[in-house]
Image (cartoon, rainbow, N blue to C red):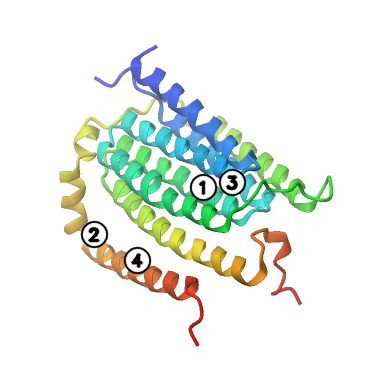
Amino acid sequence: MNLQSVPFEWYLILAAVLFTIGAVGVVTRRNAIIVFMAIEMMLNSVNLVFISAAQFLGDISGQIFVLFVMAVAAGEAAIGLAIVLALFRNKRTVYVDEVNVLKW
Amino acid sequence: MSLEVALFILFGIGAIASAIGTVTRRNPVAAAVNLIAHFFMLAGLYLTLQAQFLAVLQILVYAGAIMVLVVFVIMLLNLGNEEALREQFTLRKVLGVVIAALFLLQVSVLMNSAPSEHVHLSSNAAMLGTAESIGQALFTTYLFPFEAISLLLLAALVGAIILAKRKVE
């Protein structure tokens, strides 16, 4: 029935490529909001691995984990953006290389 | 080429293109729109994996809730285009290239050592993706993590309000 389906490895390669793009975005961008979006992208590529593993192995646990990752990502979004707002209010910038108050 | 493979290639290329768009746009709003497209492409990929409940949830939670929050903050801060870094070759750009090379090296090593036999989608994959089976597992086996995650969301809610509110004298 599933003889024509996409190989498991293709999903893993795609997820690895997406994770790499996200990681490169995190280290190369200055804007804190875009860094934050790249982090979301990395979380999503891990979700793709979880779901494909769940569906290929026939085990529901992977999908439950994706639900938890989504909840953590939602919490992270709220906290992260609140931090960006507080940062902008105090330092008038959202560029991560201009924020060095913790540097001594 | 079967329909599944065609859809996978379509959504996969779309996901990679919108991901690259997200990390390369100077304008934060353009990056956010690219990211929304990326989330839709991923929802399509989840559908090719027959995980329909999570595909809908992906659109609702990520493309709906989280991206609205991000766009709202961009609007609130009234950001312009990001200026380029002052130096041409910074440590961060070098680090980005190193990370990309490392990850792709790892993938190629893994692909060469992978067993050659073809793994197929589990025969009950379509059943696993329904709201019914996920709810069943969530409220029986995973009840404690489910309650813990609600506590985490409460903590995040309180923390976000404390962080973002102005100081009241």
Q: How far apart are marks 3 and 1 (CA)?
A: 18 Å
Q: Which mark is residue B153?
A: 4
Q: Residues within 10 Å of mark 3 (few under 14, many from 20)?
A: many
Amino acid at circle 4: Leu
SS class, disc 4: helix
Q: Which one is closest to the eye, mark 3 or mark 1?
A: 3
Taking the spot 25% from the left edge, 67% from the top edge, the residue there is B147
Asked if marks 4 and 1 touch (Cβ < 8 Å), the reply is no
Same subunit under labels 4 and 3? Answer: yes
Amino acid at circle 1: Met
Identify the image quadrant of residue B43: top left
- Name the residue beneath numbered marker 3: B28
SS class, disc 1: helix
Q: Residues within 10 Å of mark 1 (few under 14, many from 20)?
A: many
Instruction: State whether residue A74 is above or below residue B26.
Output: below
Taking the spot 74% from the left edge, 73% from the top edge, the residue there is A103
Residue B134 placement (x, y as % from top left): 21, 47
Q: Distance between the residues labelled 2 and 3?
A: 38 Å
- Name the residue beneath numbered marker 2: B142
The answer to whether residue B54 is left or right of residue A13 is: left
Dot 4 or dot 3, earlier in sequence: 3
Q: Which chain carries label 2?
A: B
Dot 4 or dot 2, earlier in sequence: 2
- Name the residue beneath numbered marker 1: A42
Q: How crowded is mark 4: few (under 14 residues within 10 Å), some or many (20 or more)?
A: some
Q: Which chain carries label 3?
A: B
Amino acid at circle 2: Tyr
Q: Distance between the residues labelled 4 and 1?
A: 20 Å
Identify the image quadrant of residue B57: top left
Taking the spot 72% from the left edge, 45% from the top edge, the residue there is B98
Q: Which one is closest to the eye, mark 1 or mark 2?
A: 1
